[in-house]
């Protein structure tokens, strides 16, 4: 790997502690690499875990990546398929937990990990992640977790049997979480140097495929058409956009944040809320913003209710979401409704959430 920076993201003492934990692993034990479950792992989390898995493998140490949640975002699916990432779930952990002697969290904290286990090492770039006593907490203020992993593995002097593949994965992780390094307020010199150095090693065709040319299904375009079928003046109000993708399947949930990300690129739009009705059972919402004044976790709670079954702050700054269960009567009403009646019901929900947002952010 290239020469190191003058400044250090990872201290020599932190490197020593990481190596001590790895070297003390019993020979008959494996390493559990754990990513986040809500939302399901994104390219940054997947790249971080994969890089560690291959670094450990080159040391003769076996490991498994544990993931939570249904993965349906087209880019995440492309990462898993193209990089041949094998994921384990919580049930696998429950059956085989005795096989593991070291737990490493990648891009997640204890309250959002894919499995319920105490970590030995945490690599994370979310500064609100809680510090865990007795754990090596490597939580750094950078734009992507892949940046932390890259700089640590570089200091360790990791040599990979497939350097181009790992460089591509980590570069995609940084590119995705920093929006191609465009998040000026979040991108650091460490992100810039890591991205620059990794790009000199990547498989360029694969990098482009995973960042710009990953496949989407026709179902995505149906959702996009639905989202933009409403009167444009109703969708875009000031710097805010609130849109509904209609009724979707569980496997289509990740279309909502993908559409929200696209709409956030619209001129003068600073906040996007996308809403879908999942199989008539619940509302799934995705929030995207580039406004620093919005505390995304508090915003989601205020808009969708503190008693929502799920309120997440997303895997990167400026992203969040919620899962709002339908009541029994709402489920019956939706199930019995004709398509045009469902559109009316969706519009009522959209108007309600627009009103809530306008109350919370009167200047939006």
Image (spheres, rainbow, N blue to C red):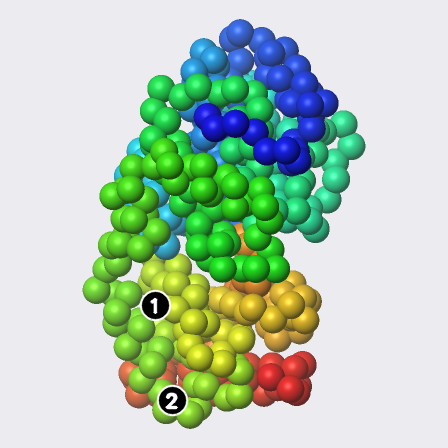
Taking the image as shown, residue 89 lies to the left or right of residue 107, namely: left
Residue found 67% across the figure and 81% down from its top = 360
Does 212 sit above or below residue 203?
below
Residue 96 at x, y = what percent? 49, 22
Residue 276 at x, y = what percent? 41, 71
Q: Quadrant of residue 135?
A: top right
For residue 326, which numbered disc appears in the image?
Answer: none
Q: Secondary structure at mark 1?
A: strand
Residue 105 visible in the shown view:
no
Residue 270 at x, y = what percent? 53, 75
Find the distance from the CA under tag 2 to the CA under tag 1. Answer: 21 Å
Which quadrant would the C terminus be assigned to in this image?
bottom right
Q: Secondary structure at mark 2?
A: helix
Q: Which residue is mark 1?
A: 248
Q: Quadrant of residue 136?
A: top right
Q: Nearer the viewer, residue 233 or 290?
A: 290
Residue 235 visible in the shown view:
yes
Q: Which residue is mark 2?
A: 232
Q: Residues within 10 Å of mark 1 (few under 14, many from 20)?
A: many
Taking the image as shown, residue 155 lies to the left or right of residue 232, namely: right
Q: Nearer the viewer, residue 254 or 136?
A: 136
Q: Are marks 2 and 1 in contact (CB under 8 Å)?
A: no
Residue found 40% across the figure and 21% down from its top = 160
Residue found 52% across the figure and 27% down from its top = 3
């Amino acid at each position: 790997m290239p020469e190191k920076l003058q400044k250090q993201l990872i201290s020599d003492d932190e490197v020593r502690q990481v190596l001590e934990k790895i070297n003390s692993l019993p020979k008959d034990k494996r390493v559990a690499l754990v990513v986040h479950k809500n939302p399901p792992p994104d390219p940054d989390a997947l790249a971080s875990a994969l890089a560690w898995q291959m670094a450990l493998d080159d040391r003769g140490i076996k490991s498994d990546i544990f993931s939570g949640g249904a993965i349906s975002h087209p880019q995440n699916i492309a990462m898993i398929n193209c990089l041949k990432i094998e994921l384990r779930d919580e049930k696998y952990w429950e059956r085989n937990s005795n096989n593991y002697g070291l737990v490493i969290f990648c891009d997640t904290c204890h309250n959002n990990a894919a499995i319920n286990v105490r970590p030995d090492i945490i690599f994370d770039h979310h500064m609100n992640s809680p510090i865990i006593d007795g754990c090596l907490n490597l939580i750094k203020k950078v734009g992507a977790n892949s940046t932390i992993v890259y700089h640590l593995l570089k200091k360790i002097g990791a040599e990979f049997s497939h350097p181009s593949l790992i460089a591509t994965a980590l570069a995609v992780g940084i590119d995705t979480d920093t929006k191609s390094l465009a998040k000026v307020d979040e991108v650091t010199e460490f992100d810039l140097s890591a991205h620059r150095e990794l790009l000199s090693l990547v498989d360029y065709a694969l990098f482009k495929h995973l960042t710009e040319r990953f496949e989407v299904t026709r179902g995505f375009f149906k959702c996009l058409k639905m989202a933009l079928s409403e009167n444009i003046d109703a969708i875009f109000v000031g710097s805010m956009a609130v849109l509904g993708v209609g009724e979707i399947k569980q496997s289509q949930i990740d279309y909502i944040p993908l559409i929200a990300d696209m709409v956030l690129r619209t001129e003068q739009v600073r906040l996007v809320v996308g809403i879908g009705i999942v199989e008539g059972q619940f509302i799934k919402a995705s929030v995207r913003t580039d406004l620093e004044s919005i505390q995304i976790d508090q915003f989601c709670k205020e808009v969708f209710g503190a008693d929502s079954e799920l309120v997440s702050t997303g895997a990167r700054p400026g992203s969040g979401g919620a899962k709002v269960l339908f009541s029994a009567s709402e489920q019956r009403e939706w199930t019995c409704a004709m398509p045009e009646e469902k559109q009316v019901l969706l519009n009522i929900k959209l108007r309600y959430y627009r009103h809530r947002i306008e109350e919370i952010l009167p200047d939006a």
